[in-house]
Image (cartoon, grey):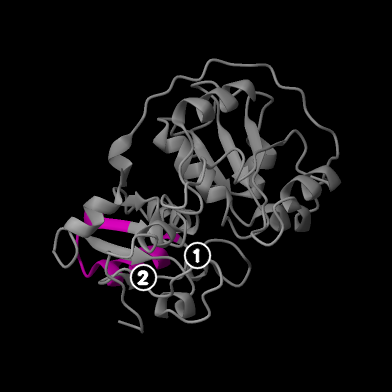
């Protein structure tokens, strides 16, 4: 087998190296239309690709206090992946049509479950099609495989950890939302506008170039280096609105060789659900 892909994979490498043992997973989704992903998958997807839904497969039940996209139960997700034929040796490739916005969630989740052989297709569906590659409407048949759950809980933190470390040098909090939502403006998804005090804004779309692909590793390393101010990536805690686009920033950091950052999965939607937690607005 080729060297495992653990962050990004190009269309060329996917086309040349993929084997029937690999698993390609379509992660397309739209916050405005929960059925978007299933409909677009049925209309055409990468040949052999399976589909996983952000809210049904890659998130857990919402309680009103745990954010809009809480993490799924690890055992349930492991069973779903095993049912798709993902074994401990399987190379997984996740893709979407939103610059990796949703595929990065599956990338992070698999690593959280202890499966490092997972990569996001750089440029997504658009790069695949523009490269002259076909789509398929066939639904593949899966043969179940043994997926060993090796949970890596050190990859995430909870709200108590964030609150305890506010204002300390032990945590660099990075918010992946759009700048206006970070400032507390134009908030349409959550009941409270603003950000966690001390968080630095790094819009996840800034990880991409004009072609919709991730910027070069050297450029990402320089940009995140400025955010970290020479600090250790292990102090970085990444969040967003609901723990989805923060994974995009985590993927960008990993592609740049800056590993060790952690996810606050509940993110702003969990944080602001508790009125006793502090809120900041504006650009600082």
Q: Position of residue 185 (x, y in %)?
A: 48, 82
Cα–Cα span, label 2 and label 1? 10 Å
Give the number of the disc on residue 276.
none
Q: Is residue 225 magenta?
A: yes
Q: Nearer the viewer, residue 107 or 197?
A: 197
Q: Position of residue 159 (x, y in %)?
A: 29, 53
Give the number of the disc on residue 215.
1
Q: Nearer the viewer, residue 171 or 136?
A: 171
At x 67%, y 50%, the residue is: 28
In this view of the protein, can residue 86 be seen by the observer? yes
Q: Magenta segment range? A: 217-237
**Quarter in which the C terminus is drawn:** bottom left
Residue wearing tag 2: 223
Q: Residue furthest left?
A: 169
Label 2: how many residues lie within 10 Å, few (<14), some (14-19) or many (20+)? Answer: some
Q: Nearer the viewer, residue 220 or 34?
A: 34
Q: Position of residue 194 (x, y in %)?
A: 39, 75
């Amino acid at each position: 087998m080729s060297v495992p892909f653990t962050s990004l994979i190009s269309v060329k490498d996917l086309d040349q190296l993929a084997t029937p043992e690999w698993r390609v997973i379509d992660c397309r989704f739209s916050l405005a239309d929960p059925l978007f992903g299933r409909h677009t998958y049925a209309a055409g997807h990468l040949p052999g690709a399976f589909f996983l839904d952000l809210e049904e497969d890659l998130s857990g039940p919402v309680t009103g206090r745990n954010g809009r996209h809480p993490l799924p139960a690890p055992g349930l997700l492991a069973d779903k992946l095993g049912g798709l034929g993902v074994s401990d040796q399987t190379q997984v490739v996740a893709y979407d049509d939103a610059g990796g916005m949703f595929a990065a969630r599956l990338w992070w989740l698999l690593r959280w479950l202890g499966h490092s052989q997972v990569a996001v297709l750089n440029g997504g569906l658009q790069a695949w099609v523009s490269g002259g590659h076909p789509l398929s409407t066939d639904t593949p048949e899966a043969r179940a495989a043994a997926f060993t759950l090796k949970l890596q809980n050190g990859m995430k933190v909870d709200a108590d950890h964030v609150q305890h470390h506010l204002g300390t040098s032990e945590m660099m909090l990075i918010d992946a939302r759009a700048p206006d939502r970070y400032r507390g403006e134009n908030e349409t998804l959550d009941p409270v506008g603003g950000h966690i005090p001390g968080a630095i804004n790094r819009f996840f779309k800034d990880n991409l170039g004009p072609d919709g692909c991730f910027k070069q590793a050297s450029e990402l390393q320089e940009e995140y280096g400025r955010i970290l101010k020479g600090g250790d990536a292990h102090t970085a805690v990444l969040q967003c609105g609901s723990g989805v686009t923060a994974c995009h920033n985590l993927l960008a950091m990993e592609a740049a060789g800056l590993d060790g950052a952690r996810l606050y999965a509940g993110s702003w939607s969990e944080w602001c659900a508790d009125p006793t937690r502090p809120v900041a607005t504006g650009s600082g």
